Image (cartoon, helix red, strand yellow):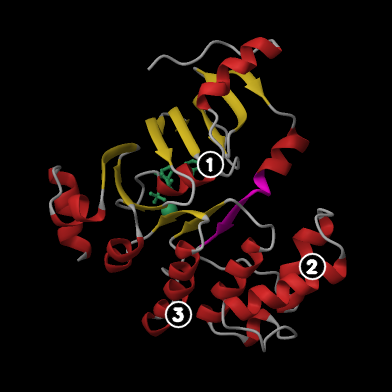
Amino acid sequence: GQLPPLPKTGAQRETFGQWRAPGWVKIHGVSKSFGQLKVLDNIRLDIKAGSVTAILGPSGSGKSTLLRTINHLERVDDGFITVDGELVGYRKSGRTLYELKEKDILKRRAEVGMVFQSFNLFPHLTVLENIIEAPVSLKRLSRPEAINLACDLLARVGLGDKTNTYPRQLSGGQQQRVAIARALALRPKVLLFDEPTSALDPELVGEVLDVIKELARSGTTLIIVTHEIGFAREVADTVIFMDAGKIVETGSPDQILNRPANARTAEFLAKVL
Ligand code: ADP
Ligand code: MG
């Protein structure tokens, strides 16, 4: 459909009402280039509150960039994204039509958790301190409240006994579970995972996937870039295949993984299965 008009006045901003749906991620006509390279090419995607979306695709297809735009770490050249019904920016051919102030973008970003391939824990902080850092520094919680929450979250990811441990003393799988607990500490409505098990030894993949499966049941909206096809089949409501900056195919796990309609999807699956 047509992009809505430039939201200059309050009344015009109201016309964005139709794009606002709490708990949803709406990606509307999003394009993004790095120099000459079009990394995202007119992406349109509606992600329902509480759903699990698995994104598959070859290296370089734009998966990480798409997650980074959802997290407002990357500004789009065209289109807009709303997370939990909130518009952050709206650009057309590189021209900014609407954009929140940086400080408000930071606030919005805190509502979208992100877990990376390389756990990115603070090495000089204990597990507990890693988890309470953001909620305390963003003044979301008092220190004692944050500690209580951190203990609950660590128990949930099976690491209740590791509060005073430093990241280097943990296995990769344990570090990634701490990273998940840390992302949850801001109580995000949407949680993004960028190949969360790709850096792990094979025997540690299962423990991280089990934590994500548990989250999938808890009603948090999850968007997961993964090459774990079996996991996607089991957990995802929707599977998306991306190639060269485009969404090539979207459907149920059965549709995309068992009966792909597109030759590129089939070719990719043949390689990773
Ligand atoms: P994927 O996660 O699917 O492997 P990415 O989104 O990381 O793909 O990257 C898509 C393309 O964009 C790649 O060709 C990559 O080299 C390029 N790219 C990503 N980030 C940048 C950047 N900050 N500057 C320039 N090129 C980038
Ligand atoms: Mg990537």
Which residue: 65% across, 73% down? 153
Q: Is residue 144 above or below residue 75?
A: below
Q: Position of residue 90 (x, y in %)?
A: 57, 23
Three-letter amino acid code at the position of disc 3? Glu
Find out if the beta carbon at label 1 lies less than 8 Å from the nearest ligand 1 atom.
Answer: no
Q: Is residue 169 above or below residue 145?
A: below
Disc 2 and disc 3: Cα gap in Å?
25 Å
Residue 125 can be seen in this image: no
Residue 51 can be seen in this image: yes
Task: Depth check: give the residue in front, 217 or 74.
Answer: 217
Disc 3 and disc 1: Cα gap in Å?
26 Å
- The residue that mark 2 highlights is 146
Q: Position of residue 184 (x, y in %)?
A: 63, 62
Three-letter amino acid code at the position of disc 1? Ile
Q: Which residues are magenta?
A: 109-116
Asked whether 250 falls inside the magenta stretch, the response is no
Q: Is residue 83 above or below residue 181?
A: above
- The residue that mark 3 highlights is 207
Q: Secondary structure at mark 1?
A: helix
Contact between marks 3 and 1 (CB within 8 A): the answer is no
Which residue: 62% across, 17% down? 14
Which residue: 74% across, 76% down? 128
- The residue that mark 1 highlights is 70
Asked whether 114 falls inside the magenta stretch, the response is yes
Which residue: 59% across, 76% down? 156
Question: Which of the two discs, 2 and 3, labels the residue nearer the N terminus?
Answer: 2
Task: Depth check: give the residue in front, 13 or 267.
Answer: 13
Q: Please tell me whether mark 2 or mark 1 is closer to you in this view.
A: 2
